[in-house]
């Protein structure tokens, strides 16, 4: 009896809301057709290589989200009275939590769209992110997946990523590295240039064209600052090249009796420390000499 009454009530509700149900069904069909047409167009652009795979996937995801959102809005408008009770319960129970989650998701979504459209970097690019050289594996609408040189995968929310300063090395481009050194005005710039170029010539993984170059970069109060420019094609070598060049410069300057200069205040502090050390040694020697003189 109860089941029969439920069936009768359900059938009656369908008859009463037949017009609205047909409208919802028509909207769903239209949304599906539009989604299918736009998806086909995106795939066609991808095949013609006018759109890369990652951007194509993101656009399809975005279309799906928009389609679901439009469908849900229309359904809610048509059945607002029936949904009012449930909407009130949901709003009271989890409105705040859902609100914060939606804000973060929406922020990441907007940032993802900016990355996809403005293209500060693309899938396959090698970038410098927070002093780490990483490869971009995938750009999703909410987060970006990257991998560092140690093959550690990194997942960064797009909203956070878009706020960071990023250097894009591209896929296969010549990269320039700069090493700065400061030497006294008493040192001959020609000698400094000669030594720096000799150091660069030892490295077989540097490009010959463009060739390494030395510039007199800046005249400081306490020294002349020189810049050694070298060029590489493999960005994986960046950490190693930077370290090895600095190490080679340090030891080569020692061999050629060229002293790296630091700011005057640091030199003064070092001089004071040296004087203190000399004074301590002198006092120690004097103390050792006093017993000897007594014995004599």
Image (cartoon, rainbow, N blue to C red):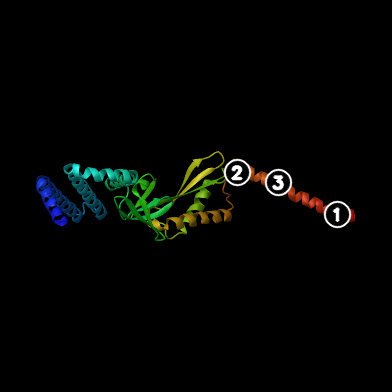
Q: Earlier in the sequence, mark 1 or mark 2?
A: 2
Q: Earlier in the sequence, mark 3 or mark 1?
A: 3
- CA gap between label 1 and label 2 equals 39 Å
Q: Quadrant of residue 262?
A: top right
**120 displayed left or right of 196:** left
Question: Which mark is on residue 276?
Answer: 3
Q: Judge whether 238 appears above or below 72 on screen.
A: below
- CA gap between label 3 and label 1 equals 24 Å
Residue in view at x 64 percent, y 46 percent = 270
Q: Are marks 3 and 1 in contact (CB under 8 Å)?
A: no
Residue in view at x 49 percent, y 46 percent = 226
Residue under pointer 2: 266
- In the rendered image, residue 260, in percent from the top left (x then y), is placed at 56, 48
Q: Earlier in the sequence, mark 3 or mark 2?
A: 2
Residue at the limit of the structure toward the right, as seen here: 296
Question: What is the tally of numbered marks visible in this picture?
Answer: 3
> 10 Å neighbourhood of mark 1: few (<14), some, or many (≥20)?
few
Q: Quadrant location of the N terminus?
A: bottom left
- In the rendered image, residue 159, in percent from the top left (x then y), is placed at 35, 46
Question: Which mark is on residue 291?
Answer: 1
Secondary structure found at label 2: helix
Q: Quadrant location of the C terminus?
A: bottom right
Q: Are marks 3 and 2 in contact (CB under 8 Å)?
A: no
């Amino acid at each position: 009896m109860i089941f029969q009454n439920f069936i009768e009530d359900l059938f009656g509700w369908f008859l009463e809301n037949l017009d609205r149900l047909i409208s919802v069904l028509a909207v769903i069909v239209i949304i599906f057709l539009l989604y299918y047409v736009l998806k086909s167009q995106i795939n066609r652009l991808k095949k013609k290589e006018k759109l890369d795979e990652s951007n194509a996937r993101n656009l399809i995801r975005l279309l799906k989200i928009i389609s679901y959102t439009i469908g849900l809005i229309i359904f809610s408008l048509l059945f607002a009275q029936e949904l009012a009770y449930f909407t009130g319960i949901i709003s009271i129970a989890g409105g705040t939590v859902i609100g914060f989650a939606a804000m973060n998701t929406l922020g990441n979504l907007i940032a993802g769209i900016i990355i996809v459209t403005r293209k500060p970097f693309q899938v396959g690019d090698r970038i410098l992110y927070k002093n780490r050289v990483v490869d971009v594996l995938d750009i999703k609408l909410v987060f970006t997946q990257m991998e560092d040189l140690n093959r550690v995968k990194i997942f960064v929310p797009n909203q956070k990523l878009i706020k960071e300063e990023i250097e894009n090395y591209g896929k296969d481009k010549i990269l320039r590295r700069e090493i700065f050194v400061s030497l006294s005005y008493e040192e001959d710039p020609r000698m400094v240039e000669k030594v720096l170029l000799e150091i660069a010539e030892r490295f077989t993984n540097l490009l010959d064209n463009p060739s390494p170059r030395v510039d007199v970069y800046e005249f400081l109060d306490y020294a002349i600052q020189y810049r050694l420019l070298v060029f590489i094609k493999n960005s994986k070598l960046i950490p190693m090249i930077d370290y090895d060049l600095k190490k080679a410069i340090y030891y080569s300057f020692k061999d050629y009796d060229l002293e790296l200069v630091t700011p005057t205040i640091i030199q003064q502090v070092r001089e004071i420390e040296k004087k203190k050390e000399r004074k301590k040694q002198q006092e120690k020697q004097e103390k050792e000499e006093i017993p000897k003189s007594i014995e004599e």
